Image (tube, rainbow, N blue to C red):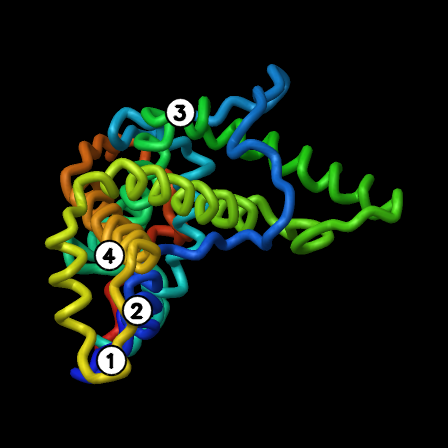
């Protein structure tokens, strides 16, 4: 989020604010393997596809993993906004289009759009060859094995000694991939940033006798920062226009909890 500016903001503050728009990679610095590389073993248990987003498959295991991350947010939302506690039938289809299950599915859909659009664009730009969840699970196992072997050999390991879950690894790798995609988009956008754009941006946020000279080096830094902002907007536009196809029949079997005869149990009064 960009901090608010004052009229006397100096150029260092300008560049810092612009650069903050770019996403910092979630993984720690250091050598890493190619993103989502490798081929899943043929012995891996089949994970059915429950839909696609921009033609990127969404597997049942991937959907469930996102669901597990969002479930507590739904509980919190309905408790704080509607005074609704957990009860038998809480996750029932009969809670309707404004109930907990519908809210959960909306959150999952939005998160999958955010992730899958990045994966789709990254594949188009050659940053990855395969973004399937099966491949990521295989990479997760191999990465933890690599870290164990490195530690046993007394080598430096950047970040955690082990990723505690595939979900944590999933988001670390997604953060890295999103960062690399934004870098690629910004690189494409940079030539379209004119000197007039740079001057206008500089003048808008710089004033006073201490303003730094707008030399070629500073112009390039501002160009890169503006290109980074443009890359963010471009990615948001792609996400807004995402093509989402999720199989409702298959998703009926993926909910946080199935209660006995849950459809027959009315929710408690919120009064």
- Spatial CA distance of label 2 from label 4 is 34 Å
Asked whether the viewer can see residue 255, the reply is yes
| Among the two numbered marks 4 and 1 on one chain, the one whose residue lies closer to the N terminus | 1
The total of numbered circles placed on residues is: 4
Q: Viewer-proximal residue, 221 or 129?
A: 221
Mark 4 vs mark 1: in front:
1
Decide if residue 190 is on the left or right side of residue 172.
Answer: left
Residue 112, horizontal then vertical, whole percent: 32, 43
Residue 76, horizontal then vertical, whole percent: 34, 71
Q: Secondary structure at mark 3?
A: loop
At 27% from the left and 36% from the top, the residue drawn is 188
The residue at which mark 2 appears reads as 17
- Spatial CA distance of label 4 from label 1 is 42 Å
Asked whether the viewer can see residue 104, the reply is no
- Spatial CA distance of label 4 from label 3 is 35 Å
- Spatial CA distance of label 3 from label 2 is 30 Å
For the residues labelled 2 and 1, say whether their Cβ atoms are less than 8 Å apart.
yes
At 31% from the left and 32% from the top, the residue drawn is 121
């Amino acid at each position: 989020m960009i901090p608010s500016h004052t009229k006397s903001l100096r150029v260092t503050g300008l560049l810092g604010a612009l650069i903050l728009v770019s996403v910092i990679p979630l993984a720690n610095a250091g050598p890493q393997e190619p993103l989502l590389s490798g081929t899943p073993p043929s012995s891996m248990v089949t994970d059915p596809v429950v839909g696609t987003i921009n033609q990127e498959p969404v597997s049942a295991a991937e959907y469930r993993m996102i669901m597990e991350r969002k479930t507590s947010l739904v509980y919190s939302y309905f408790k704080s906004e509607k005074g609704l506690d957990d009860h038998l039938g809480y996750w029932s289809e009969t809670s309707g289009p404004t109930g907990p299950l519908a809210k959960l599915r909306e959150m999952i859909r939005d998160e999958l759009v955010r992730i899958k659009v990045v994966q789709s664009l990254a594949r188009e730009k050659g940053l990855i060859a395969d973004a399937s969840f099966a491949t990521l699970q295989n990479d997760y196992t191999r990465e933890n094995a690599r870290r164990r072997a490195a530690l046993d050999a007394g080598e430096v390991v950047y970040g955690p000694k082990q990723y505690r879950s595939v979900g944590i690894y999933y988001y670390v790798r997604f953060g890295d991939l999103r960062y690399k995609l934004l870098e690629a988009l910004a690189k494409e956008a940079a030539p379209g940033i004119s000197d007039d754009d740079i001057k206008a941006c500089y003048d808008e946020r710089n004033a006073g006798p201490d303003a730094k000279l707008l030399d070629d080096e500073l112009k390039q830094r501002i160009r890169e920062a503006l290109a980074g902002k443009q890359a963010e907007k471009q990615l948001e536009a792609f996400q807004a226009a995402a093509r989402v196809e999720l199989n409702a029949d298959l998703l009926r079997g993926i909910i946080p909890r199935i209660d006995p005869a849950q459809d027959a149990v009315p929710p408690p009064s919120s009064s």
